[in-house]
Image (tube, helix red, strand yellow):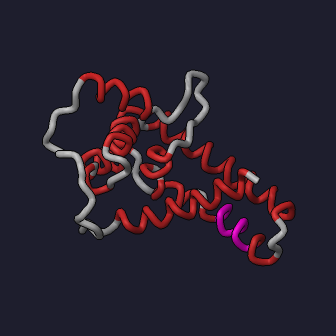
Amino acid sequence: MWPIILLATLTWFCFLYLLSLFPFRVCNSVEKKDPNRSISKRDSENSERMSSAVDATGNPIPTSAVLTASAKHIGLRCMPENVAFLKCKKNDPNPEKCLDKGRDVTRCVLGLLKDLHQKCQKEMDDYVGCMYYYTNEFDLCRKEQEAFEKVCPLK
C-alpha cells in the first residue's frame, strides 16, 4: 500500500517541480517569513537537524522538504519507473498487480536521494534546510536551489 502512497506523493512533487519553473507567485495572500531575517541559532539547529537527507546509517529520509528539493531530479531520473507504474495502474486498478512497479519507483527515488547526498551534500542540505524552514516555498530558496543545481546538474 505504501508504494502507492509514495507514487502519489511523487506525482505531487512532479507537479511542484512544474510550479518551481515559474518565478511568479500564484497566491500572494499566504503570509511568509521575511527572507532577510537572520535565522536564530535554535531555528538553524532545527533546520540542520531536520534537513539532512540521510539518517546516521546513510539511508535516505524522504521528508517533504527533501522530496520537494529533489523533485526535478526525481522527475528526470525516475521517469521510466514512474511511467511503468502509471501504465500498470491504468491497465489494472488492483493495487496488488502493481506492487513490483511501486517498489521500483521507491528503489529509484531512495537510490537517487542517496546519490545526491553523496555527490553534493552541503548544497543539498542547504537547499533542503531552506525548504524546510520556509515550508517548501520555492521562491524563497532560489539562491540555494541555484547552488544545488550547479553542483548536481539535471541530467
Furthest toward the bottom, the residue is: 91
- Which residue does the image show at 44% across and 45% down from the upper left? 65
- Which residue does the image show at 76% across and 53% down from the upper left? 1
- Closest to the observer: 53 or 137? 137
- Closest to the observer: 112 or 19? 19
Where 48 falls versus 85 (above or below)? above
Image coordinates for residue 15, horizontal then vertical, percent: 47, 67
Furthest toward the left, the residue is: 36
- Which residue does the image show at 32% across and 55% down from the upper left? 138
Residue 86: quarter of image: bottom right
Image coordinates for residue 123, horizontal then vertical, percent: 35, 38
Residue 6: quarter of image: bottom right
Image coordinates for residue 24, horizontal then vertical, percent: 24, 68
Where 52 falls versus 130 (above or below)? above
Image coordinates for residue 97, horizontal then vertical, percent: 86, 64
Q: How many marks?
A: 0
- Which residue does the image show at 80% across and 77% down from the upper left? 91
Bounds of the magenta span? 80-87
Where 83 falls versus 61 (above or below)? below
Q: Horizontal placement of 23 versus 66: left or right?
A: left
Q: Horizontal placement of 30 versus 90: left or right?
A: left
Q: Horizontal placement of 142 versus 129: left or right?
A: left
Where 146 falls versus 95 (above or below)? above
Is residue 26 a member of the stretch shown in magenta?
A: no
The secondary structure making up most of the magenta span is helix
